[in-house]
Image (cartoon, helix red, strand yellow):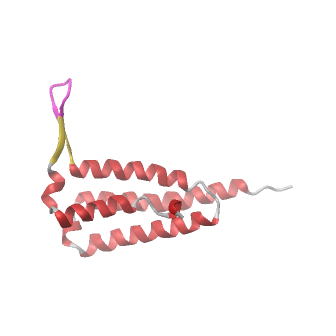
């Protein structure tokens, strides 16, 4: 049952938690900085960390989509609901009208499209003709 929970809901809820509790300027605040060999300074922000986390979860979601059982259908359906929730929030909530949230929404869309595509390809390879 736990494997049916779409992992992309975690960055979605993380964005909303930061937005509600600390406000939008927090996304631009630096988490850490590093001096590069070139002499430049690289700063990782809260928003950047959220995107990296979402991309890591996207990898695991695509790996989950290679399963060809009934649980994968429920997982794809729930992932679609997460994308629809992101789209509605992007269109209706002023605090979500940012490029950061748009990128997170696109990652959830890629999760939905890739999940269905990989599942269809995997299911097609499981069919055997004698």
- Up-down: is 35 above or below 3? above
In the visual, does 119 lie left or right of 38? right
In the visual, does 5 lie left or right of 122? left
**3 within the magenta span:** no
Q: How many labels does the image show?
A: 0
Question: Relative to the observer, which residue lies in front, 96 or 26?
Answer: 26
Q: Main secondary structure of the magenta part?
A: loop
- Up-down: is 7 above or below 20? above
Residue at 52% over, 65% down: 75
Residue at 22% over, 50% down: 46
- Up-down: is 33 above or below 38? below
Question: Relative to the observer, which residue lies in front, 14 or 102?
Answer: 14
Quadrant hosting residue 96:
bottom left
Q: Looking at this rendering, what residue extends furthest in the right direction?
A: 130
Quadrant hosting residue 25:
bottom left
Image quadrant holding the N terminus, namely bottom right
Q: Looking at this rendering, what residue extends furthest in the front direction?
A: 1
- Residues rendered magenta in the picture: 34-41
Image coordinates of residue 32 in percent, x first then y, are 18, 40
Residue at 27% over, 73% down: 91
Quadrant hosting residue 111:
bottom left
Image coordinates of residue 85 in percent, x first then y, are 36, 72
Question: Relative to the observer, which residue lies in front, 63 or 120?
Answer: 63
Image quadrant holding the C terminus, namely bottom right
Image coordinates of residue 7 in percent, x first then y, are 43, 58
Image coordinates of residue 128 in percent, x first then y, are 79, 55
In the visual, does 90 lie left or right of 70? left
């Amino acid at each position: 049952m736990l494997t049916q929970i779409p992992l992309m809901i975690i960055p979605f809820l993380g964005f909303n938690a930061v937005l509600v509790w600390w406000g939008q300027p927090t996304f631009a605040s630096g988490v850490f900085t590093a001096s590069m060999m070139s002499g430049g300074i690289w700063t990782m922000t809260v928003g950047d960390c959220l995107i990296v986390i979402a991309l890591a979860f996207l990898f695991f979601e695509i790996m989950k989509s290679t399963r060809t059982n009934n649980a994968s259908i429920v997982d794809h359906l729930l992932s679609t609901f997460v994308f629809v929730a992101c789209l509605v929030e992007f269109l209706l909530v002023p605090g979500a009208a940012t490029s950061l949230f748009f990128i997170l929404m696109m990652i959830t869309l890629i999760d939905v499209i890739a999940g269905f595509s990989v599942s269809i390809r995997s299911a097609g390879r499981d069919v055997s003709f004698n």
